[in-house]
Image: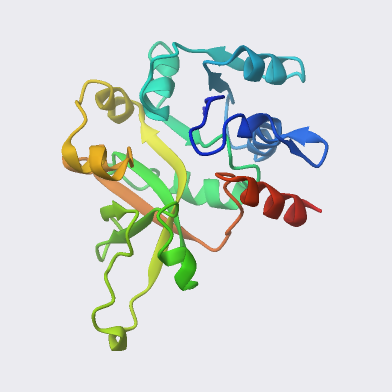
Amino acid sequence: MIPARYSASRFPGKLMQNLVGKSVILRTYEATVATKLFSEVYVVTDSDIIFNEIVSNGGKAIMSKTEHESGSDRIAEAVADVECDIVVNVQGDEPFTERESLRKVLEVFKDDEAKEIDLASLMVEITDWEEINNPNTVKVIVDQNNFALYFSRSPIPFPRDKEVGARYFKHKGIYAFRKEALLDFTVMPMQFLEATEKIECIRYLEYGKRIKMVETQVQGVEIDTPEDLERAKRLWK
């Protein structure tokens, strides 16, 4: 499922921006289908413009209610009556979505017979201090078994002792949910940590859900700003 809002706050209409001949959302949809990992791929949107963009190009789309607070809520509505075990959320502004990273995320559920993992997601190491300090870059810290401890827009861990040589990881906004964990999300009220940071996956942690993080080396470009779009164009070419 690819949740897709037209009215993004930082870059309105970004999903319909031209990325070397095709819109950002169509590039993302086609990249996700091309992984051949999924039984079905849908764009879930509240926008007629985005719905028509996908359907007119031979893709599958679902119209959702407009009042959803998050991508998880939008997806949960779409899958409520769908028979499935695992639901993957691919962000609509991720045109560089590729097979290997998604395969790694799905793989963690195969050995999880005790169902200890509620959802899984991706992280990529970052070393540039400008990016580490950028509040648009969501950082994640994990325990020894790579379960998420916390997500933040601030640099975590704070480098009080630079001799330790801490590693920093950016959270890439791709999630694989057990269906029941996703449906639980819709009935769990937002708490103050999520409200403060404006990071929806914090809600899962606040309610005791376990998020398994998977490291990837694929950086890609998430398109949050016009500058990101220009970088994406250069990378695509």
Residue at 25% x, 84% y is: 161
Colour scheme of the picture: rainbow
Which residue is nearer to you in this view: 87 or 70?
70
Residue 7 on image: x %, y %: 53, 25
Q: Report x, y in % for residue 190.
A: 21, 30
Please say if 87 is above or below 44.
Answer: below
| Residue at the (37%, 57%) spot, across then down | 139
Which residue is located at x 33 percent, y 77 percent?
Answer: 166
Q: Which residue is at the far bottom? A: 163
Q: Which residue corresponds to the image point at 57% horizontal and 59% vertical from the top-left?
A: 219
Decide if residue 160 is in sight here: yes
Of 231 and 43, the residue lying toward us: 231
Observer able to see residue 114 = no
- What x and y, as percent, mark residue 72? 38, 28
Residue 227 vs residue 66: left or right? right
Q: Is residue 215 left or right of residue 149?
A: right
Q: Is residue 105 left or right of residue 156?
A: right
Out of 82 and 160, give the one closest to the viewer. Answer: 160
Asked which quadrant contains residue 189, the reply is top left
Q: Nearer the viewer, residue 157 or 76?
A: 157
Residue 77 lies, with reference to residue 6, above or below; the image says above
Q: Position of residue 206 (x, y in %)?
A: 17, 41
Q: How many marks?
A: 0
